[in-house]
Image (tube, rainbow, N blue to C red):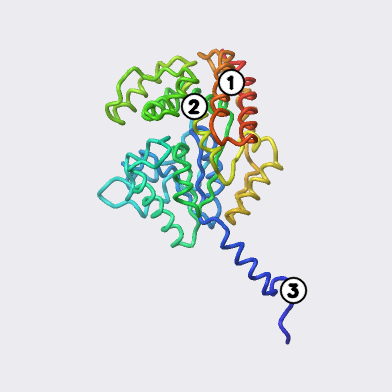
Amino acid sequence: MPPLSGPLNDPSNATDHAERQDALKQAIFLHAGWRSAGTWIWSRLRALDQVTGFYEPLSNVLAELSSADVGASRPTLTSGHPPLAKPYFDEYRPFLHDGSRGVAGYDRRFSTDRFGSIPDREFPALQAYLSTLCQHAASQGSMPAFKFCRSSGRLPWLRDAFPHALHAAVLRNPASQFASGWLLSQQWSNPFFVAAPFRVLGLNQAEPLVREAIGICDVKLPPVPVTSEDAYAMACEQYARTAEGNNAYRAFLALWILSALRMSQGVDLLIDIDRLGQSRDYATTVSAAFAAQSGVSPDLSSARDLVDETRRSASRMTGIDGRAMRAVHSAALRFLKAQNGVDASFAELVREKMVLANELTDAWR
Protein backbone atom coordinates (compact mmCIF):
# COMPACT_ATOMS: atom_id res chain seq x y z
CA MET A 1 0.00 0.00 0.00
CA PRO A 2 1.41 3.42 -0.91
CA PRO A 3 1.90 5.82 1.96
CA LEU A 4 -1.04 8.05 2.81
CA SER A 5 -0.85 11.52 1.32
CA GLY A 6 -2.17 14.70 2.86
CA PRO A 7 -1.09 17.58 5.07
CA LEU A 8 -0.02 15.45 8.04
CA ASN A 9 2.40 13.48 5.88
CA ASP A 10 3.69 16.36 3.83
CA PRO A 11 7.42 16.70 4.71
CA SER A 12 7.26 20.48 4.34
CA ASN A 13 4.33 20.60 6.76
CA ALA A 14 6.28 18.51 9.27
CA THR A 15 9.15 20.99 8.99
CA ASP A 16 6.80 23.91 9.57
CA HIS A 17 5.37 22.14 12.62
CA ALA A 18 8.85 21.55 14.05
CA GLU A 19 9.76 25.20 13.51
CA ARG A 20 6.56 26.31 15.24
CA GLN A 21 7.34 24.06 18.19
CA ASP A 22 10.86 25.44 18.41
CA ALA A 23 9.48 28.99 18.41
CA LEU A 24 7.14 28.35 21.34
CA LYS A 25 8.10 29.75 24.72
CA GLN A 26 9.28 27.22 27.27
CA ALA A 27 7.94 28.86 30.45
CA ILE A 28 5.33 31.40 31.51
CA PHE A 29 6.18 34.33 33.77
CA LEU A 30 2.92 35.98 34.87
CA HIS A 31 3.72 39.43 36.28
CA ALA A 32 0.87 40.78 38.40
CA GLY A 33 0.21 43.12 41.30
CA TRP A 34 -1.41 42.35 44.63
CA ARG A 35 -5.22 42.11 44.24
CA SER A 36 -4.98 42.22 40.44
CA ALA A 37 -6.70 38.83 39.87
CA GLY A 38 -3.39 37.34 38.79
CA THR A 39 -3.96 34.34 41.05
CA TRP A 40 -7.13 33.50 39.13
CA ILE A 41 -5.33 33.54 35.78
CA TRP A 42 -2.51 31.45 37.25
CA SER A 43 -5.06 28.96 38.59
CA ARG A 44 -6.40 28.47 35.05
CA LEU A 45 -2.88 27.80 33.79
CA ARG A 46 -2.14 25.46 36.69
CA ALA A 47 -5.29 23.46 35.90
CA LEU A 48 -3.71 22.32 32.62
CA ASP A 49 -2.07 18.87 32.70
CA GLN A 50 1.03 20.08 30.88
CA VAL A 51 1.74 22.94 33.32
CA THR A 52 3.57 23.07 36.67
CA GLY A 53 2.31 26.14 38.49
CA PHE A 54 4.71 27.83 40.91
CA TYR A 55 2.86 30.29 43.13
CA GLU A 56 4.65 33.46 44.30
CA PRO A 57 8.25 32.22 43.89
CA LEU A 58 9.54 35.46 45.44
CA SER A 59 7.27 35.47 48.51
CA ASN A 60 8.94 35.79 51.91
CA VAL A 61 6.70 32.90 53.03
CA LEU A 62 9.04 30.53 51.19
CA ALA A 63 11.89 31.37 53.57
CA GLU A 64 10.09 29.64 56.46
CA LEU A 65 8.04 27.06 54.56
CA SER A 66 8.27 23.42 55.67
CA SER A 67 6.80 20.25 54.24
CA ALA A 68 4.29 20.18 57.08
CA ASP A 69 3.11 23.72 56.22
CA VAL A 70 2.29 23.09 52.57
CA GLY A 71 -1.07 21.43 53.14
CA ALA A 72 -2.40 24.45 55.04
CA SER A 73 -1.50 26.92 52.29
CA ARG A 74 -4.98 27.23 50.82
CA PRO A 75 -7.33 30.13 50.04
CA THR A 76 -9.16 31.64 53.02
CA LEU A 77 -12.75 32.83 52.97
CA THR A 78 -11.58 36.44 52.77
CA SER A 79 -8.88 36.03 50.10
CA GLY A 80 -11.20 36.22 47.11
CA HIS A 81 -9.06 33.56 45.46
CA PRO A 82 -10.57 30.67 43.48
CA PRO A 83 -10.82 27.18 44.99
CA LEU A 84 -7.62 25.26 44.31
CA ALA A 85 -7.27 21.53 43.73
CA LYS A 86 -3.86 21.63 45.46
CA PRO A 87 -2.36 23.94 48.10
CA TYR A 88 -0.73 27.13 46.86
CA PHE A 89 2.83 25.90 47.42
CA ASP A 90 2.39 22.23 46.51
CA GLU A 91 4.87 22.41 43.63
CA TYR A 92 7.69 23.38 46.00
CA ARG A 93 7.63 20.05 47.88
CA PRO A 94 10.69 18.69 45.98
CA PHE A 95 12.65 21.72 47.22
CA LEU A 96 11.82 21.26 50.90
CA HIS A 97 13.82 19.06 53.24
CA ASP A 98 12.66 17.29 56.38
CA GLY A 99 13.93 18.87 59.56
CA SER A 100 14.56 22.28 58.03
CA ARG A 101 12.63 25.26 56.73
CA GLY A 102 12.87 27.19 53.51
CA VAL A 103 12.71 26.40 49.80
CA ALA A 104 16.14 25.41 48.45
CA GLY A 105 17.73 28.27 46.54
CA TYR A 106 15.35 30.91 47.90
CA ASP A 107 16.72 34.01 49.67
CA ARG A 108 14.69 36.51 51.70
CA ARG A 109 16.20 39.36 49.72
CA PHE A 110 14.25 38.18 46.65
CA SER A 111 10.98 39.28 48.30
CA THR A 112 11.48 43.02 47.80
CA ASP A 113 10.88 44.27 44.28
CA ARG A 114 13.54 46.54 42.79
CA PHE A 115 13.24 49.35 40.27
CA GLY A 116 16.87 49.91 39.33
CA SER A 117 17.84 50.33 35.70
CA ILE A 118 20.33 47.45 35.95
CA PRO A 119 20.22 44.14 37.88
CA ASP A 120 21.37 44.33 41.50
CA ARG A 121 23.96 42.07 43.09
CA GLU A 122 21.32 39.58 44.26
CA PHE A 123 19.97 39.03 40.76
CA PRO A 124 22.38 36.24 39.67
CA ALA A 125 21.22 34.17 42.67
CA LEU A 126 17.59 34.94 41.82
CA GLN A 127 18.16 33.92 38.20
CA ALA A 128 19.80 30.67 39.30
CA TYR A 129 16.90 29.91 41.67
CA LEU A 130 14.23 30.44 39.01
CA SER A 131 16.30 28.49 36.48
CA THR A 132 16.37 25.52 38.87
CA LEU A 133 12.58 25.60 39.17
CA CYS A 134 12.28 25.77 35.38
CA GLN A 135 14.65 22.85 34.90
CA HIS A 136 12.77 20.73 37.43
CA ALA A 137 9.47 21.27 35.61
CA ALA A 138 11.09 20.56 32.24
CA SER A 139 12.59 17.33 33.58
CA GLN A 140 9.04 16.21 34.35
CA GLY A 141 7.94 17.02 30.79
CA SER A 142 5.98 20.03 32.02
CA MET A 143 5.95 23.78 31.39
CA PRO A 144 6.62 25.98 34.45
CA ALA A 145 4.15 28.82 35.02
CA PHE A 146 5.16 31.37 37.65
CA LYS A 147 2.74 33.82 39.23
CA PHE A 148 4.59 36.86 40.59
CA CYS A 149 3.44 39.80 42.72
CA ARG A 150 6.94 41.12 43.38
CA SER A 151 8.47 41.19 39.91
CA SER A 152 7.12 44.24 38.08
CA GLY A 153 10.10 46.45 38.90
CA ARG A 154 12.49 43.71 37.81
CA LEU A 155 10.46 42.79 34.73
CA PRO A 156 13.09 44.09 32.25
CA TRP A 157 15.80 42.15 34.10
CA LEU A 158 13.75 38.96 34.04
CA ARG A 159 12.78 39.39 30.40
CA ASP A 160 16.43 39.66 29.40
CA ALA A 161 17.53 36.79 31.68
CA PHE A 162 14.72 34.47 30.54
CA PRO A 163 14.12 35.18 26.84
CA HIS A 164 12.72 31.67 26.41
CA ALA A 165 9.78 32.53 28.70
CA LEU A 166 6.46 34.07 27.76
CA HIS A 167 6.32 37.24 29.85
CA ALA A 168 2.65 38.09 30.44
CA ALA A 169 1.49 41.02 32.56
CA VAL A 170 -1.85 41.70 34.24
CA LEU A 171 -3.25 45.24 34.21
CA ARG A 172 -6.27 46.13 36.35
CA ASN A 173 -7.64 49.63 36.82
CA PRO A 174 -6.11 51.15 39.98
CA ALA A 175 -9.39 51.95 41.72
CA SER A 176 -10.62 48.35 41.62
CA GLN A 177 -7.24 46.93 42.55
CA PHE A 178 -6.80 49.27 45.52
CA ALA A 179 -10.39 48.78 46.71
CA SER A 180 -9.86 45.02 46.91
CA GLY A 181 -7.00 45.47 49.40
CA TRP A 182 -8.52 48.43 51.28
CA LEU A 183 -11.70 46.51 52.07
CA LEU A 184 -9.67 43.61 53.45
CA SER A 185 -7.96 46.07 55.78
CA GLN A 186 -11.16 47.82 56.81
CA GLN A 187 -13.32 44.74 57.32
CA TRP A 188 -10.86 42.06 58.36
CA SER A 189 -8.01 44.06 59.94
CA ASN A 190 -5.56 42.79 57.33
CA PRO A 191 -3.21 45.73 56.61
CA PHE A 192 -0.82 43.84 54.31
CA PHE A 193 -2.12 45.19 51.01
CA VAL A 194 -2.25 48.76 52.32
CA ALA A 195 1.27 48.46 53.75
CA ALA A 196 2.87 46.84 50.69
CA PRO A 197 3.09 49.97 48.48
CA PHE A 198 4.62 52.00 51.34
CA ARG A 199 7.18 49.25 51.88
CA VAL A 200 8.17 48.86 48.23
CA LEU A 201 8.34 52.62 47.63
CA GLY A 202 10.29 53.26 50.82
CA LEU A 203 12.85 50.56 50.15
CA ASN A 204 13.35 51.87 46.60
CA GLN A 205 13.27 55.60 47.35
CA ALA A 206 16.96 55.95 46.49
CA GLU A 207 16.05 55.27 42.85
CA PRO A 208 15.43 58.58 41.01
CA LEU A 209 12.45 57.19 39.10
CA VAL A 210 10.79 56.01 42.31
CA ARG A 211 11.46 59.33 44.06
CA GLU A 212 9.83 61.11 41.13
CA ALA A 213 6.71 58.92 41.33
CA ILE A 214 6.51 59.47 45.10
CA GLY A 215 6.66 63.22 44.56
CA ILE A 216 4.23 63.26 41.62
CA CYS A 217 1.64 61.37 43.67
CA ASP A 218 2.41 63.35 46.86
CA VAL A 219 2.99 60.22 48.94
CA LYS A 220 3.82 60.57 52.64
CA LEU A 221 6.02 57.61 53.58
CA PRO A 222 6.28 56.29 57.16
CA PRO A 223 8.41 58.76 59.17
CA VAL A 224 11.07 56.21 60.07
CA PRO A 225 14.56 55.57 58.69
CA VAL A 226 15.30 52.48 56.64
CA THR A 227 17.63 50.60 58.96
CA SER A 228 16.79 47.11 57.69
CA GLU A 229 14.23 45.66 55.34
CA ASP A 230 12.51 43.66 58.09
CA ALA A 231 12.32 46.61 60.46
CA TYR A 232 10.98 48.88 57.73
CA ALA A 233 8.37 46.28 56.73
CA MET A 234 7.13 46.16 60.34
CA ALA A 235 7.00 49.95 60.48
CA CYS A 236 4.98 50.07 57.27
CA GLU A 237 2.47 47.56 58.61
CA GLN A 238 1.98 49.65 61.74
CA TYR A 239 1.71 52.80 59.63
CA ALA A 240 -0.91 51.15 57.40
CA ARG A 241 -3.18 50.35 60.33
CA THR A 242 -3.89 54.05 60.85
CA ALA A 243 -2.93 55.40 57.43
CA GLU A 244 -5.01 58.28 56.11
CA GLY A 245 -7.07 56.87 53.24
CA ASN A 246 -6.10 59.43 50.62
CA ASN A 247 -2.39 58.88 51.34
CA ALA A 248 -2.83 55.09 51.15
CA TYR A 249 -4.38 55.46 47.70
CA ARG A 250 -1.65 57.84 46.52
CA ALA A 251 1.01 55.34 47.62
CA PHE A 252 -0.79 52.55 45.82
CA LEU A 253 -1.10 54.64 42.65
CA ALA A 254 2.61 55.54 42.70
CA LEU A 255 3.52 51.85 42.76
CA TRP A 256 0.82 51.06 40.18
CA ILE A 257 2.15 53.59 37.66
CA LEU A 258 5.75 52.46 38.20
CA SER A 259 4.68 48.88 37.51
CA ALA A 260 2.72 49.99 34.45
CA LEU A 261 5.83 51.77 33.18
CA ARG A 262 7.83 48.54 33.46
CA MET A 263 5.08 46.71 31.55
CA SER A 264 5.32 49.31 28.79
CA GLN A 265 9.01 48.48 28.39
CA GLY A 266 8.24 45.08 26.96
CA VAL A 267 5.98 42.13 27.63
CA ASP A 268 4.89 39.40 25.25
CA LEU A 269 1.27 39.49 26.36
CA LEU A 270 -0.63 42.20 28.23
CA ILE A 271 -3.85 41.03 29.89
CA ASP A 272 -6.51 43.67 30.57
CA ILE A 273 -8.27 42.09 33.52
CA ASP A 274 -11.16 44.59 33.37
CA ARG A 275 -12.02 43.54 29.81
CA LEU A 276 -11.52 39.87 30.59
CA GLY A 277 -14.62 39.72 32.77
CA GLN A 278 -16.72 41.81 30.41
CA SER A 279 -16.04 40.21 27.04
CA ARG A 280 -16.10 36.51 26.16
CA ASP A 281 -14.49 37.38 22.84
CA TYR A 282 -11.60 39.04 24.61
CA ALA A 283 -11.21 36.06 26.94
CA THR A 284 -11.03 33.79 23.89
CA THR A 285 -8.46 36.09 22.29
CA VAL A 286 -6.22 35.98 25.39
CA SER A 287 -6.45 32.18 25.55
CA ALA A 288 -5.50 32.01 21.89
CA ALA A 289 -2.54 34.32 22.50
CA PHE A 290 -1.27 32.02 25.23
CA ALA A 291 -1.64 29.07 22.85
CA ALA A 292 0.10 30.81 19.96
CA GLN A 293 3.11 31.80 22.06
CA SER A 294 3.46 28.92 24.52
CA GLY A 295 1.35 26.05 23.21
CA VAL A 296 -0.93 26.01 26.26
CA SER A 297 -4.43 27.45 26.26
CA PRO A 298 -6.05 28.26 29.62
CA ASP A 299 -9.84 28.42 29.80
CA LEU A 300 -10.60 32.00 30.82
CA SER A 301 -14.30 31.94 29.99
CA SER A 302 -15.45 32.07 33.63
CA ALA A 303 -13.74 35.39 34.45
CA ARG A 304 -15.81 37.60 36.76
CA ASP A 305 -16.78 41.18 35.96
CA LEU A 306 -14.54 42.83 38.56
CA VAL A 307 -15.42 46.37 37.49
CA ASP A 308 -19.07 45.74 38.32
CA GLU A 309 -18.02 44.30 41.68
CA THR A 310 -16.14 47.52 42.44
CA ARG A 311 -19.19 49.59 41.60
CA ARG A 312 -21.34 47.50 43.91
CA SER A 313 -18.90 47.86 46.81
CA ALA A 314 -18.63 51.67 46.55
CA SER A 315 -20.68 52.31 49.69
CA ARG A 316 -18.16 50.35 51.75
CA MET A 317 -15.18 52.43 50.57
CA THR A 318 -15.07 54.83 53.49
CA GLY A 319 -12.28 57.11 54.65
CA ILE A 320 -11.22 58.27 51.17
CA ASP A 321 -12.21 61.43 49.29
CA GLY A 322 -12.61 59.79 45.91
CA ARG A 323 -13.10 63.04 44.00
CA ALA A 324 -9.72 64.29 45.20
CA MET A 325 -8.12 61.35 43.40
CA ARG A 326 -8.82 62.82 39.96
CA ALA A 327 -5.80 65.10 40.26
CA VAL A 328 -3.61 62.17 41.34
CA HIS A 329 -4.75 60.07 38.38
CA SER A 330 -3.88 62.93 36.02
CA ALA A 331 -0.47 63.43 37.61
CA ALA A 332 0.37 59.73 37.37
CA LEU A 333 -0.64 59.65 33.70
CA ARG A 334 1.56 62.67 32.95
CA PHE A 335 4.45 60.91 34.70
CA LEU A 336 4.03 57.85 32.48
CA LYS A 337 3.78 59.87 29.26
CA ALA A 338 6.91 61.82 30.15
CA GLN A 339 9.08 58.68 30.22
CA ASN A 340 11.11 57.73 27.18
CA GLY A 341 9.91 54.92 24.96
CA VAL A 342 6.31 54.59 26.17
CA ASP A 343 4.23 53.35 23.25
CA ALA A 344 1.28 55.59 22.35
CA SER A 345 -1.19 52.68 22.40
CA PHE A 346 -0.05 51.67 25.89
CA ALA A 347 -0.33 55.26 27.12
CA GLU A 348 -3.86 55.35 25.73
CA LEU A 349 -4.75 52.14 27.59
CA VAL A 350 -3.47 53.66 30.84
CA ARG A 351 -5.46 56.82 30.13
CA GLU A 352 -8.59 54.66 29.78
CA LYS A 353 -7.78 53.03 33.13
CA MET A 354 -7.51 56.45 34.75
CA VAL A 355 -10.85 57.55 33.27
CA LEU A 356 -12.44 54.41 34.67
CA ALA A 357 -10.72 55.00 38.02
CA ASN A 358 -12.16 58.55 38.09
CA GLU A 359 -15.64 57.12 37.64
CA LEU A 360 -15.21 54.43 40.29
CA THR A 361 -13.58 56.62 42.95
CA ASP A 362 -16.12 59.40 42.47
CA ALA A 363 -18.53 57.47 44.73
CA TRP A 364 -16.00 57.01 47.55
CA ARG A 365 -16.40 59.13 50.69
SS at circle 2: helix
Residue of label 3: 6
Residue of label 2: 181
Contact between marks 3 and 2 (CB within 8 A): the answer is no
SS at circle 3: loop
Q: Residue at x 65, y 28 (%)?
A: 352
Q: Which residue is drawn at 39% across and 39% down?
A: 59
Q: How far apart are marks 1 and 2 (CA)?
A: 22 Å
| 251 sits left or right of 234 in the view | right
Compared with 260, 332 (above or below) is above
Q: How far apart are marks 3 and 2 (CA)?
A: 56 Å
| 192 sits left or right of 85 in the view | left
What's the residue type where badge 1 is placed?
Ser
Q: Where is residue 183 in the image (x, y as percent from the top left)?
A: 50, 23
* Disc with the residue nearer the chain's start (1 vs 2): 2
Q: How crowded is mark 2: few (under 14 residues within 10 Å), some or many (20 or more)?
A: many
Q: Position of residue 112 (x, y in %)?
A: 38, 35
Q: Residues within 10 Å of mark 1 (few under 14, many from 20)?
A: some
